[in-house]
Image (cartoon, helix red, strand yellow):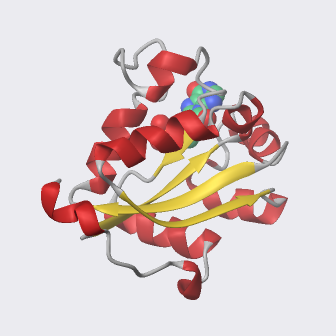
Amino acid sequence: MERTFLMIKPDGVQRGLIGEIVSRFERKGLKLVAAKFMVVSRELAETHYAEHEGKPFYEPLLNFITAGPVFAMVWQGDNVIALTRAMIGKTDAVDAMPGTIRSDFAVHTNLNLIHGSDSPESAAREIANFFAPEQLVEYEHTVQRWI
Ligand code: IDP
């Protein structure tokens, strides 16, 4: 069973979209494993976005992700990484398919509401950056056999 790290960014929190976005993943049948409402420190932002260091949007991206609270989550399910990336949509809202989170609610590339891990390796790294192992809750998701 695969896990992914999803984070509603400060724009999603400020726009009151936590419930809407979480609801989409719940209705999909994915299993919530951990969640945390928090402000990302500069240090954590640098770690999380290390792959973008040196790019023109790097500094604005750090300023944005630390500008207000985020809603960090871990979700679990078969193919959860590919499924949630598909539900989130392309980075630029202009290219995102209608029905995706970014197409439905975002306008700009830099204010694109949500982060989702793009591979099992980045998911493992990002989950470990944001959550201690004991914060991942183990429980039976009783509807799983119907999904
Ligand atoms: P993703 O979030 O769709 O996986 P990445 O390429 O990993 O996209 O980029 C991480 C984040 O950096 C994006 O979600 C977006 O907020 C920001 N970003 C990426 N490319 C640009 C850009 O060209 N201009 C401004 N911000 C960007």
Q: Residue at x 63, y 32 (%)?
A: 17
Quadrant containing ligand 1: top right
> Could you tell me if residue 93 is visible in this image?
yes
- How many numbered marks, from 0 up? 0
Q: Position of residue 72 (x, y in %)?
A: 62, 57
Where does the image place residue 19, in percent across and percent down from the top left?
59, 39
- Compared across the picture, whether 137 is left or right of 130 comes to left
The quadrant the N terminus occupies is bottom left
Q: On screen, 82 above or below 95?
A: below
18 and 85: which one is in front? Answer: 18
Residue extending furthest toward the front: 142
- Identified at 66% across, 50% down, the residue is 53
| Depicted 128 relative to depicted 108: above or below | below
Side of 145 where 84 appears, left or right: right
Residue 62 screen position, x and y as percent = 76, 46
Of residues 49 and 6, the one drawn nearer to the viewer in this rendering: 6
Whether residue 49 can be seen here: no
Which residue is nearer to you in this view: 59 or 36? 36
Counting from the top left corner in percent of width and height, residue 118 is at 38, 51
Q: Residue at x 54, y 33 (%)?
A: 20
> Which residue occupies 47% across, 41% down?
23
- Judge whether 71 appears above or below 47 on screen: above
Pick the front one: 127 or 38: 38
